[in-house]
Amino acid sequence: MNNKPKTKLLTISLLCCGRPDTTERCLKSLMPIREAIDSEIQVVDTGCSKETRAVIEKYADEVFDFVWCNDFAKARNFQLDQANGKMFLFIDDDEWFLDTKYIIDFFKQPDCTSYNIGGYFQRNYLDFDAKEYSDIEVVRMCSVTPKTYFVGKVHEYIEPSYGNAMFMDARAGHFGYVYASEEENRAHSMRNIPLLKEMMEENPENFRWPYQLAQEYKALKEFDKLYELCKDGFERASVYNEEEENENIRYRGSFICGMALALYELDRQDDLIELYKTQGAKPTILQLPLAYLAYFAASVFFKIKDNEQCKIACEYYLKTYEEVGKDQAQMFIQGGLFASEAFTSTKLNMVYCFLMTMGLEQNDFAPLIHYYRRISWNDRVVRLNRGFLSMIVKKASEYGNKKEIRNVLNKFFTTNGFRMLIENEIERQYQNLTEEELERLGTAFKGTEGEKELKLFVEIRLMEKQFSGIEYWESYNELIDALSQYANLTAQWQEIHDSWLLDDDEVKPLDSTTILSNGIKQFIQLSDNDITASLTTLKNLFGIRPSLTDALGELKRLYAERIKVYQAKADNPEKFEEMYQLEESVLHQIADLDAAGKSDEAIGAYQQLVGIMQNTFGVDTLHI
């Protein structure tokens, strides 16, 4: 209980036992607040190393020692008791403020002390490169009174939790939920789970603890346990109690969201659709969690090709996004565990993709025109639905250079990742397209930023399709000429492809077509000089591009005949010349017979010639 006289406006505090580098990053981010506001920085050392302690003492106004007892609320209450400020703001030692402007602005307002609770947004990064993240509201501010205290051995919270609230538009970066290994992830959750279960036993009516336990089960991907926990929580929170209804309706929403996520991950499609239909007919939850449920239902409807129901679910989701998702206050009021993630850019992108794909299936381009601009093309990480990618390539192969399609295709040349995405999709589909469709697909990119590259890319796929349609090649030189053309075309494409990589020292990975083409060129260079090396090179080319397997098989056959011819010429030049002239003469006779319409005689003469060559040199022809 804090009864101290208040000598400061604000106490900024943190519990600390972390690494010196992350602790210093945290403390450095607090200094603008410390310098701009009548404030103090207090740190509670719960077991720091000497290095971390040295960092703390460099920044903190006061440092206190606390013997860790596996109870965060006790540590926070000890922390709160030391505060000299009227207001209390706390941050974890593995967080750091990305911008303190709004915090400073808030505490400069004369009425800032009229708020008894509040917080900021925690930006939880989903990868160590900080490319993806989700922002969630965290309660991290309160007024300091004798009645203010923390509750909870883990995932602690402030009481009283009602009254005049203020969420500052500030973000604190946090890598705390990104783990180097699955073992680290499990260890973190296994630390929390026993404590949460203890609190559930001690206070079974408090829905906060199963609410937090659900988060741990999600992190561990234990979706069976997540479903059962949330189902039980939902049923208990659905028992009507007028005094608790405002709080329970939020918990019901989070539990429904947990059930939806679990059912989706467990591939229990029928149960998920039944849950969605039940809540849609007579909702017992708020709009935001119902939109979250609608998203997963739409995903299932899209997968099973129930386009009518998918469209209804998507439209409800987007309607709620307009009404709730763009209103920060409503997102806080209706949000909570899982529900706050209803309108991530990935989920929005997927819904747009569902609607565009369903429209294109009916050759209706209106949804494409309406929604493609809404996709978050400029995010650092953008996920698109595979069905949409497949459909846009399919329609491009049907319509060719159609404006509505071209405008979307042009978006795939804003980043290297998008460009790779569309090329990979073409690679996945091209064997199932006709030559005419491939030609139209090539023209679809005319006028886009990737016109030159994709023209070559599609031409290469077209050549591969043509190669795969030829089972027998009569001439080694004809096949070599075709393969050389393929290799040269691939080299042109790879050069344009590499130009997207802006850094000269960046590793430029070779596409499988280029690896094959380089091997073909190497084979051609070696073929007349080093038979052993050329055969080894040829052997290594098989399997790189399955569509060229037959052509490479023919190359192997024709090259073997070529080697026999060269060997025969070297072993007995006179005999070789005699037989060469004989073949030349017979081939002229065959041509004359064929020209005279004596096809049967021409065929017979040719078969006789092949028999003579096989008996003499073991080859069909000396004309290689």
Image (tube, rainbow, N blue to C red):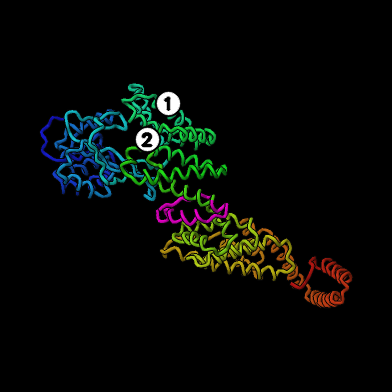
Q: Position of residue 139 (x, y in %)?
A: 27, 37
| Residue 357 % position (x, y) | 53, 51
Was residue 360 drawn as part of the magenta stretch in this picture?
yes
Left or right: where 90 falls relative to 110: right
Q: Position of residue 402 (x, y in %)?
A: 54, 63
In the rendered structure, the answer to whether residue 23 lies left or right of residue 81 reads: right
Q: Nearer the viewer, residue 425 or 591?
A: 425
The answer to which image quadrant residue 529 occupies is bottom right
Q: CA distance from mark 2 to mark 1?
A: 29 Å
Disc 2 crowd rating (10 Å Cα; few below 14, some 14-19, many 20+) is some
Residue at 52% over, 56% down? 365
Q: Nearer the viewer, residue 425 or 440?
A: 440
Q: With respect to residue 103, does 149 lie above or below?
A: above
Q: Quick one: quadrant of the C terminus? A: bottom right
Residue occupying image coordinates x 59% and y 60%: 397
Q: Which residues are magenta?
A: 359-386
Badge 2 vs badge 1, beta-carbon distance below 8 Å: no
Q: Is residue 574 visible?
A: no
Amino acid of disc 1: Glu
Q: Which residue has dot 2 on it? A: 188
What residue does disc 1 label? 235
Q: Nearer the viewer, residue 623 or 567?
A: 623
Q: Can the viewer see residue 614?
A: yes
Camera-nearest label, 2 or 1: 1
Determine the residue positioned at 49% across, 50% down. Answer: 353
Q: Residues within 10 Å of mark 1 (few under 14, many from 20)?
A: few
User: Could you say whether the residue bearing mark 2 is in a helix, strand or loop?
Assistant: helix
Percent x, y for residue 21? 28, 46
On whether residue 46 falls in the magenta region, the answer is no
